[in-house]
């Protein structure tokens, strides 16, 4: 039983990624280690950001009710980046 609990808590489970894996920030795109991410609710979903500055930007956008404009700017930026 103890071995099972230890493996469940500390071991790698199916679908789990290592803490050292780097993930892109939802706002700026910078890569951040999984163990250092900041979690924020934005536009009805949980998002991962790299720092409290990016978190503050998303919270401000949401407080101002500008989620649609934010999504549109992200789409335009992604489209211009792909060209």
Image: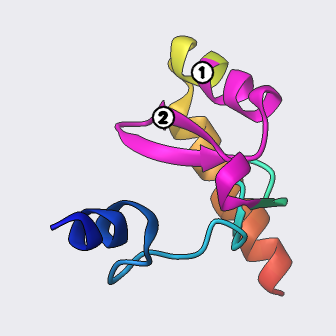
Which image quadrant: the C terminus? bottom right
Mark 1 and mark 2: span between their CA atoms?
A: 7 Å
Q: Residue tagged by mark 1?
A: 59
Per the image, the residue denoted by label 2 is 42
Q: Residue at x 43, y 74 (%)?
A: 11
Q: Residue 76 sits in which quadrant?
A: bottom right
Q: Looking at the image, is 45 positioned above or below residue 52?
A: below
Tag 1 near tag 2, CB within 8 Å: yes
Q: Say few, some or many: other residues with alpha carbon within 10 Å of mark 1 (under 14 / 14 to 19 / 20 or more).
A: some
Specify start and end residues of the magenta stretch as a single range: 33-59
Would you say residue 45 is visible in this rendering? Answer: yes
Say left or right for 58 vs 15.
right
Q: Is residue 46 magenta?
A: yes
Q: Residue at x 73, y 26 (%)?
A: 57
Residue shown at 32%/83% (left/top)? Answer: 14
The local crowd at label 2, few if under 14, some if 14 to 19, many if 20 or more residues have their Cα within 10 Å, is: some
Image coordinates of residue 27 in percent, x first then y, are 72, 47
Q: Residue furthest front?
A: 2
Instruction: Specify how the rendered protein is coloured.
Output: rainbow
């Amino acid at each position: 039983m103890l071995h099972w609990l230890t493996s469940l808590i500390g071991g790698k489970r199916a679908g789990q990624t290592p803490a050292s894996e780097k993930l892109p920030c939802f706002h700026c795109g910078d890569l951040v280690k999984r163990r250092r991410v900041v979690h924020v609710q934005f536009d009805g979903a949980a998002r991962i950001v790299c720092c409290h500055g990016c978190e503050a930007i998303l919270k401000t956008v949401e407080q101002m009710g500008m989620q649609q404009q934010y999504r549109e700017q992200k789409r335009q930026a992604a489209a211009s980046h792909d060209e």
